[in-house]
Amino acid sequence: MVEILRIENLKKHFQTAQGVVKAVDGVNISLNEGETLGLVGESGSGKSTVAYNVVGIYGATSGNIYFRGEDISMGTSRRPKSLKKDIQIVFQDPGTSLNPRQYIHEILAMPLRVHRIVPENEITDRVKELLELVQLPTSFIFKHPLELGEGEKQSVAVARALAVNPSMIVLDEPTSALDVSMQAKVINLMLELQKEYGFSYLFITHDLGVMRNVADRIAIMYLGKICEVAPAAEFFQTPLHPYTRMLISSVPVVSEEEERMRPAKVASRGEIPSPVNVPGGCGFHPRCCDATEECAGAIPEMVEVESDHFVYCHKFKQER
Ligand code: SF4
């Protein structure tokens, strides 16, 4: 497996009137070529802030992000143009990410022009090809986003990301604004495109259920930190972190096998605290049924419990 993205001890802090918000506070994850990594967490966990650092909307407070070995932890303004093109993003709400005044032709032609992907006289043909790639009629070039359904708009947003032939696409809750049938359609489209073109996906979501059939590996975030990272099958079969177990125990299941594998229901205790006032030690300790004295005093270190299965919890100690 060839690694395409490596995030090392990434921190992104914001100064606010209430104090310093440690939105991302020491994240380590990696992504391989052609792989889908699901980055999952509740609202306020910091998962979208990680995404915005990867695409360069934010520069890192500290730590490093390497794309094919090159440090890209500064914002996009200081990134080479070739790297800006290589990493694309599909946002949650296509209604706000697509300019309602532009024709679909203009929306898709812009990245082709900016990055000089094809000569001017081939732009319309390429725009039509992009629409076909995302299974939309080519007649849509004459429509505005407001004339399209939500799923169609999100497919246009996907086409715009594909326009510059990226290697990696960050999907920031790409289906959460869609109804269930449209969610399935957009996800199937993304998987088909990945099979054909080998894209790597960093898939940001709060919906762990969506990840079951989509992700190769899953990373769970809580209050700016990673709790657990594991291959998807193992993740659902043997979740280790108490927070992961709490999340999985409330994911709806659709088969007897999934029901058998599901951990016993773990009651959710309280809400995610404010990121301005993060508890000391393990940030999950006020909500954790397994918390001990150690948990309130010390931040747990990463332990590789099985090959490629990492957990940050004092219940697990690295064998030396
Ligand atoms: Fe719970 Fe302690 Fe593990 Fe944190 S470190 S998840 S509080 S057992």
Image: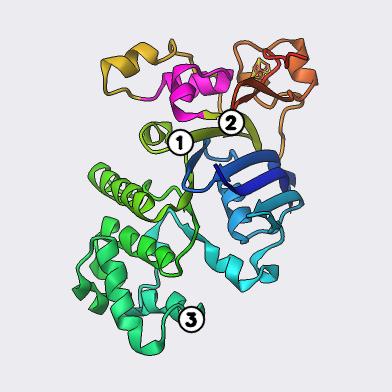
Q: Which mark sits nearer the N-terminus, 3 or 1?
A: 3
Residue positioned most to the front: 1
Q: CA distance from mark 3 to mark 2?
A: 45 Å
Task: Tell whether position 239 is magenta.
Answer: yes
Residue 290, position in %: x, y?
63, 10
Residue at the disc numbered 1: 216
Amino acid of disc 1 = Asp
Task: Label 2, secondary structure: give it.
Answer: loop
Residue 150 shown left or right of residue 215 in the figure: left
Q: Which residue is mark 2?
A: 272
- Residue 181: image quadrant is top left
The stretch in magenta equals 231-251
Q: Label 2: how many residues lie within 10 Å, few (<14), some (14-19) or many (20+)?
A: some
What residue did someone put label 3 on?
A: 116
The residue drawn where x is 67% and y is 52% is: 66
- The mark nearer the N terminus, 3 or 2, is 3
Q: Position of residue 313 (x, y in %)?
A: 67, 20
Is mark 3 in CB contact (under 8 Å) with mark 2? no
Q: Which image quadrant for residue 280?
A: top right
Provide residue 76's location: percent of width, then percent of height. 64, 66
- Crowding near the residue tagged with mark 3, few <14, some 14–19, many ≥20 C-alpha atoms within 10 Å: few
User: Is the Cβ of the residue at disc 3 closer than 8 Å to that at disc 1?
Assistant: no
